[in-house]
Image (cartoon, helix red, strand yellow):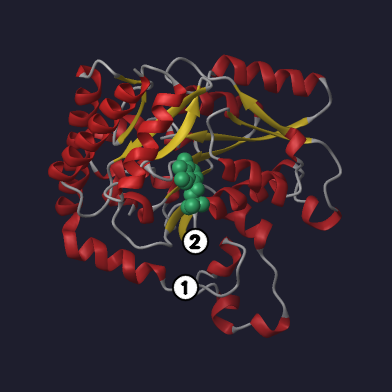
Amino acid sequence: MVDMMGLPERFLSTSSGGGVLQHSASDGALCALLAARERCSGYTTNLRGVSERMTVYTSTQAHSSIEKGIAVAGLGRENLRTIAVDETFALCPDQLEDAIVADLRAGARPCCVVATVGTTSSGAVDPLPAIGDICRRHSLWLHVDAASYGTAALCPEFRDLFRGLELADSYCFNPHKWMFVNFDCDCFYVADRAALIRTLSVLPEYLKNKATESGAVIDYRDWHVPLGRRFRALKLWFVIRHYGVEGLRAKVREHVAIARQFAQWVDEHPQFERVAPTPLNLISFRHVAGDAASQAVLERVNQSGRAYLSHTRLRDQFVIRMSIGQTHTQLQHVQRAWELICAASRDVMTNDE
Ligand SMILES: Cc1ncc(COP(=O)(O)O)c(C=O)c1O
């Protein structure tokens, strides 16, 4: 996967790090937060519990799984700092630095930053080089969540979105989102496996064996919360074998091209507007008549039973999300969905008059 996607060599098990298949991006974030917590506390928290106020930083647009991970890791939701974003919904590095400095002054221990490549609501890409630089200067763990957009790294032309990933301590993306693998399948990587293993390793008598003692095997039970593991590699391997690397790339390119076409339709339509840039396959848009009209369009389309759209809020406005990434989605399907959306808009505007 590292070769295929041009990921940093530090993530290879032949280097200092390694990767493991997990259930979900939420599990990946939790493991990253646990390792960050342990490294920050000199590996004493597992032993004695949390004894100081450790703070975690992410953007206002980060996925809710980060807040959940902080709660589960016992770091305390109050110690999550949500950093403001710019006009593209990407985290503002200056504000991040200010928040870290303010916490240091207040006697807290800044512990971890979670950056996102492809936020759920708008597909925003946080500036990894600047964030990584801040993490290095303040010795913070950097976790990068690319749950959905991570698949795009298959294509060299999209790798610029991942620039700075070599500064990350951990990284995850979900082949079960956009790489045509059935749920569940999350690729989770660390740059320093020793930190993760030291955080999660427990060795009772009944798990002792010669292969572990001699170092002949990698004990993946020390890389995540569960002991038992599903054979996720099998389905991932079969998907790669079925499509081939070029086949996967072709699908991703096709989806991005369809998304760009959809974005153009939205831009050209007088009643709709995009509310965020479209770097890859997510289009966030709204009805210009306001929240009630956007919501009515969404409900009409969903009630038709022919397409299903989800929604979010951006800048306190109701926003419709169109994500092109299903295995068999083609332009004709998206075109029909767009026709439904336009028809719903006509109905909504007529009813209003
Ligand atoms: C950016 C991002 N991170 C994390 C997640 C959570 O993914 P999972 O269901 O694998 O925990 C999502 C899900 O939509 C997401 O969009």
Q: Is residue 167 left or right of residue 306?
A: right
Residue under label 1 = 230
Up the image or down, 203 lies above or below 88; here it is below
Q: Secondary structure at mark 1?
A: loop
Up the image or down, 63 lies above or below 222; here it is above
| Residue 317 in the image, given as x and y percentages of width and height | 49, 22
In the image, what residue occupies the spot 68% across and 56% down? 199
| Residue 185 in the image, given as x and y percentages of width and height | 42, 60
Q: Are marks 1 and 2 in contact (CB under 8 Å)?
A: yes
In the image, what residue occupies the spot 44% across and 49% down? 11
Q: Is residue 164 left or right of residue 324?
A: right
Q: In the depicted view, which residue is nearer to us: 105 or 274? A: 274
Up the image or down, 196 lies above or below 211; here it is above
Q: Secondary structure at mark 2?
A: loop
Examine the rendering and report whether any part of residue 31 can be seen: yes
| Residue 35 in the image, given as x and y percentages of width and height | 65, 49
Q: In the image, what residue type sits under mark 1?
A: Arg
Answer with mark 1 or mark 2, whichever residue precedes in sequence: 2
In the image, what residue occupies the spot 43% across and 31% down? 295
Examine the rendering and report whether any part of residue 127 can be seen: no
Residue under label 2 = 23
In the image, what residue occupies the spot 54% across and 42% down? 169
Q: Which mark is residue 114?
A: none
